[in-house]
Amino acid sequence: MTGLVVAGCADRDAAQGKINTAESKLALQITSNSPSRSAPSDVTASYDIKTGRSVFTRKCLSCHGDGVKGAPKLGDVTAWADRVEQDLGILVRHAIDGRGRMPPKGGFSELSDSQVASAVAYVVNKSQRLITAANIRKHATECHPISNPTLCTEEELRDALTLHMMWLLTTKERGS
């Protein structure tokens, strides 16, 4: 039983590690991509996540909250998965110039390019975290050492084998 508890903690720690790694990679991407060719210090200022959250909730949620005219909703993992794989600079350019049914700056011409870029960085950051968490949950439900062993990592298969061996040993010791 102790092995199961330890394995559960290890799974939780591994999942948190995957989320932290994804967030670190995203933070690096956000600070290294720019809608314009600027000095690195300007790039960091351009993608202020706190400002981005404020702009997004005050302006962008009017469409992205309810999916108006097909706008991808914040939190819709499927709708954002392909988008967040694109270069952040391209996504920022699309938001500033408009794309598909979305008008330039989402119809809020009073927003600066920097504000729009920060809103895009916020959405990408939030979406990437949600996608990572969804992928971890999906993997946890699909991996099964007996019925779906190909969906398991080597570490998961070793852990399952170890737990099974411990169960066999304790069953034999009890005389069963």
Image: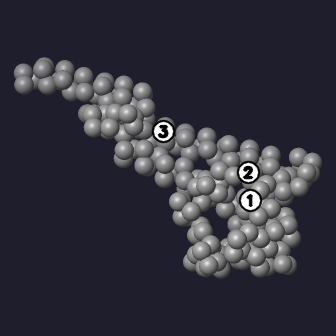
Marks 2 and 3 sit apart, C-alpha to C-alpha, by 30 Å
Q: Is residue 69 left or right of residue 40?
A: left
Circle 2: element type: loop
Tally of marks: 3
Q: Nearer the viewer, mark 2 or mark 3?
A: 2
The answer to whether residue 142 is seen in the rendering is yes
Which of the 4 image quarters holds residue 49? bottom right
Direction from residue 68 to residue 144 in the image, left or right: left
Q: Helix, strand, or loop for circle 3?
A: helix
Mark 2 / mark 3, whichever is N-terminal: 3
Estimate the x, y position of residue 102 in percent, counting from the top left: 71, 74
Q: Residue 79, located in which quarter of the rendered image?
A: bottom right
Q: Mark 3 points at which residue?
A: 13
Per the rendering, the mark at residue 87 is: 2
Contact flag, marks 2 and 3 (Cβ < 8 Å): no
Distance between the Cα atoms at labels 3 and 1? 32 Å
x and y, in percent, of residue 30 in the image? 75, 50
